[in-house]
Amino acid sequence: MSKPYYQINGGRRLEGTVTISGAKNAAVAIIPAAILAGEPCILENLPHIEDVRSLHTILEQLGVAVDFTSGDCMRIDPRGLKTTHALSPEVGHMRASYYLLGALLGSRGEVDLLLPGGCVIGARPIDQHIKGMRALGATIRVDEEKNILRAKAKKLVGAEIFFDVVSVGATINVMLAAVRAEGQTILTNVAKEPHVVDVANFLNMMGASVKGAGTDMIRIQGRQKLHGCGYSIIPDQIEAGTFMIAAAAARGDVIIKNIIPTHMEAVSAKLMESGARVIDGDDGRNFYIRVIMDERPRPCNVKTLPYPGFPTDLQQPIMAYLCAANGISTINENIFESRFNHVKELRRMGASISVKDRIARVRGISELRGATINASDLRAGASLIVAGLAASGTTNVNNIHFIDRGYEYLEQKFQALGADIQRIEK
């Protein structure tokens, strides 16, 4: 059976309003974090995406009661958790399943974890996660033949931990374990991304003591018990950025609602530098950003950096946008190696891009041409959607299961803005 693909007839101006869903990167950490409570938690504003559905399945396999039948709300009751062996294929298929390491170590003192997969974008090692857990007192060994990490701790004890590199995943994972450790933990050289702050806020709602999230240092006072709570996930910064870039690429006029404008400042700055008008507003109920673009973009230079810098997850979409710029742009990928897998697909559409090490040089052309192209990971897939919307002719995007991992109702949202995009199921 053929796999589904997106068919896009490009060149249509995008106009209208789009509402942003809950943040994928926050949701995939907060769902496992609910295991740390001794009571049920109710999570709101969860996106209906493949990674959330996979975590739903994984938690149920562990014995956790999960109900995700009421809109964007999920009820998680960890009291029935019966095993700490997270070894199913679903665990191995998604990167964020590694948050089960911190959640199960913190709540049960042990875990056997099938090492995770997800998008293939460079080495993405978990050495900083392991370093942090060992500092808290866990014994960890990796069975490389079976690809299983085994961790155990009679007692987790607070420690001072300096991360060798800034890592969102390691910051959150160690935070999950440390909230149930004895004494104080101090994490230094931590990630500051909005979803790190969101996870900390959720933990505090459960009765944890996490201070300093969003700064260079996080202080955690361990608690013996955490209680259940209700919590609403923040809007998705990356989905918002994708729609902002798509609006500019398609020479559109789009209002993006359910958004936190301060999270988008790096993206807004680059779009304005390229000639787009970006307007922050408040309609009394929601913050919004309006993006208006009427001309060919000016070239600009982009460097990906940890928050509050330009996010690596939007490097690929903005490259697609700059393919039609009036001049030469450079894109420097400082976070992940091998995050230029989309370049050869953009070249199929006529893009002029050269890559050396971690720097891409994009020589703008008047417009991209439709082609049959293949997504290699989640954000590469998003970049190909942006390219297809801006291109002349028909673009077919294959391997859209990657896109399903992180975007809710993507084609419906673009259709509502006037795009000619269809999901073709065969």
Image (cartoon, grey):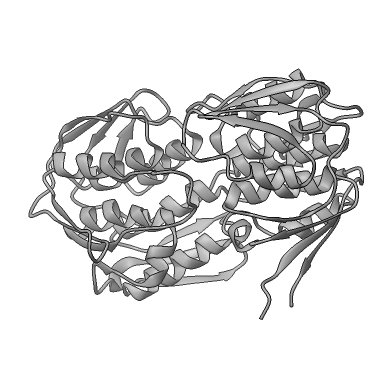
Name the quarter where the N terminus is drawn.
bottom right
Task: Residue at 52%, 25% (x, y): give it.
Answer: 308
Residue 222 locus on image (x, y percent)? 20, 41
**Direction bottom: furthest residue:** 1
Residue 322 locus on image (x, y percent)? 75, 30
* Residue 222 seen by the camera: no
In front here: 256 or 166? 166
Left or right of 332? Residue 317 is: right
Task: Residue at 90%, 46% (x, y): give it.
Answer: 392
Q: Is residue 105 above or below residue 247?
A: below
In front here: 371 or 223? 371
Q: Is residue 386 above or below residue 372?
A: above
Task: Residue at 44%, 72% (x, y): give it.
Answer: 57
Task: State the image quarter where residue 50 is shown.
Answer: bottom right
Left or right of 388? Residue 90 is: left
Name the quarter where the C terminus is drawn.
bottom right
Residue 408 locus on image (x, y percent)? 65, 57
Left or right of 306? Residue 107 is: left
